[in-house]
Image (spheres, rainbow, N blue to C red):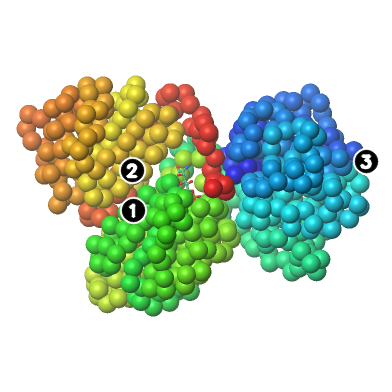
Amino acid sequence: MCGIIGYTGKGDAKEIMLDALELLEYRGYDSAGIALLKDGRTQMIKRAGRVKDLRNLCARINPEGQCGIGHTRWATHGGVCDENAHPHRFGSVTLIHNGIIENYRELIDKYELEGSLISETDSEVVAAVLQHFYQGDPYSAIRRTVLKLKGTFALAIMFDDQPDQIFAVRNVSPIVVAATADGAILSSDVAAIVPFTTDYFVMPELHVVCLKPDKIEMYDLSGDHAKIDWLKVDWDVSRSGKGGYPFYMEKEIMEQPQVIGETILPRVKEGMPDFSEEGIPDPVFADCKRICVIACGTAMHAGLVGKSLIQWVIGIHVDVVMASEFMYNDPVVDKDTLVIAISQSGETIDTLEALKFARKCGSPSISIVNVKGASIARASEYVIYTNAGPEIAVASTKAYTTQLAVLYLITARMALARGIWDEQKAKAFMEELLRVPGVIERVLETKEEIHRLAGCIINARDVFMIGRGLDYSILLEGSLKLKEVSYIHSEAYASGELKHGTIALITEDTPVIAMVTQEKLKSKELSNIREVQSRGARVVLLMKEGETLNEGEQWSCVYRLPVMEDPFMVMPASVVLQLIAYYVSLDKGLDVDKPRNLAKVVTVE
Ligand code: AGP
């Protein structure tokens, strides 16, 4: 999960790395550190805390050098302390690591390292094994070490006697590499490369890259020269940065009308959904007998909306499986199962591993990914990119709604490919989909009203969210958002389930957010709301504009959603829930973009 950076060239490596680490901090923010190699000496500066703390420390020490590696950590092995911060050093080897070395204990025993390590990390063990094999040939030492490692790793390594050079190798955990105007750079993430160039490449697994100030070389593990496949960052670089908002989360919420439009429009040809640019032939949509969506967290919640849409329109069975559980339930996927993997980062390891397994079983696969060239995109047969641009806030917002947009497009294309809809029906659906950006714009115009709604729950210890069908699916996401950024305990409940136990928790101190956007479920839903009201709960009601409420009923707060066809109401409703979570976090004075214990990219199981 950690962020990694390496730079060698003519620039001030310390400044370049500190700036990059700030951009990468969303990957983990338990500790940060850098190492600079100069005149055969390596200087390491690291500490628990944020990159700003590291910057202050560097200002006091003022290290110099034009070649260095840096790291921002999300702790796995070993607690949050200065010793466990990266880089790690053993003998003349200094490295940073992202991933988990599963056999680190065995390596400690095999190479008799007990007592000679300073930290509790698996990463320092790798440095020690590298040192064991190092006799002046970095490639040979790296090759021999990699053959001993079990687990996932992205490693950037410096050797004291290899001036101006950084070596890198990876398995699963990503590394991207680029040339800058005056040197070469590597990172876990394109976000750190974008300030320098739009040309980069993704290191293939089990290859060794050597960065020199004027050259980048890549070899496979047999020592043969490997060809580099260059890619281009094709998001608008000006979208990086907070754009005047106090937090990325607000900026990313506000960007949704634009990025949803940019996700839909290139896939609409003459009013019809179209995936010819992605090269997805219609039989992929027409021939499958069932669908299995694999994803984690927010992306999985998008999958739940997709399930409702596809089962409603197409009438085939859709499973939505938490990727982290996929392998533990004897997954049943085959050549008739279309697997759809959804991931903002494209690097979530559980999703990636589940996808690879499904492909081995012969399943056709489509991934819905935001980050271009990410591992999940490369591991699937077809990829549909959400054009959300960089999502920096740990809490996902615009990635979620653009994932939903793609799922609407898939539903429509599938209905056409299977002959379920004629052109007229598909066109009508697409017209409604094309209204989404404008409707969300209207919700955003009411953000101060939503800010006031957030006031109804800010002091709560627990918040329940209730709804049925599609409303329940989006409340699951709304509840995750609230928990993650406000630290308020919250549960989304299918309203009909409440009576089976959970209603026991409802008291006068429990705000309940109730969502009623589906006409066919409205009367049942209103009865469930009355049930919690009778137990004293304060209800915040989200319902369509123009809907009537029974006279005399007591509602603490009501928000009126702009009206769309029922299957599309999830779009405006999601944005309201995102803003509620955001304002609660903001008004509590929390670090909205970097909630405690979290990281944006989850590359460990
Ligand atoms: C969302 O707010 C979360 N931070 C998290 O649930 C996220 O959606 C999940 O980790 C999956 O990430 P991915 O989309 O990059 O695969």
Distance from mark 2 CB to nearest ligand 1 atom below 8 Å = no
Q: Quadrant where the N terminus lies?
A: top right
The residue that mark 3 highlights is 39
- C-alpha span from label 2 to label 3: 55 Å
Answer with the quarter of the image where residue 25 lies: top right
How far across and down, in percent of the image, does residue 8 sit? 81, 48
Label 1 sits on a secondary structure element that is helix
Q: Amino acid at mark 3?
A: Asp
Distance from mark 3 CB to nearest ligand 1 atom below 8 Å = no
Question: Farthest left residue?
Answer: 551
How far across and down, in percent of the image, does residue 487 sit? 42, 29
**Marked residue nearer the N-terminal end (3 or 1):** 3
Q: Residue at x 67, y 48 (%)?
A: 103
Q: Amino acid at mark 2?
A: Leu
Q: Is disc 1 surrounded by few (<14), some (14 to 19) or many (20+) residues within 10 Å?
A: many
Distance from mark 1 CB to nearest ligand 1 atom below 8 Å = no
- Give the label, 3 or 1, closer to the camera: 1
Q: Is disc 3 surrounded by few (<14), some (14 to 19) or many (20+) residues within 10 Å?
A: few
Q: How many marks?
A: 3
583 up-or-down from 434: above or below: above
Q: Residue at x 32, y 27 (%)?
A: 462
Mark 2 and 3 residues: CB-CB less than 8 Å, in contact? Answer: no
- C-alpha span from label 2 to label 1: 10 Å
The residue that mark 1 highlights is 304
234 up-or-down from 257: above or below: below
Label 2 sits on a secondary structure element that is helix
- Give the label, 2 or 3, closer to the camera: 2
The residue that mark 2 highlights is 476
How far across and down, in percent of the image, does residue 335 sit? 42, 74
Asked if residue 597 can be seen in this view, the reply is yes
- C-alpha span from label 3 to label 1: 56 Å
**Marked residue nearer the N-terminal end (2 or 3):** 3
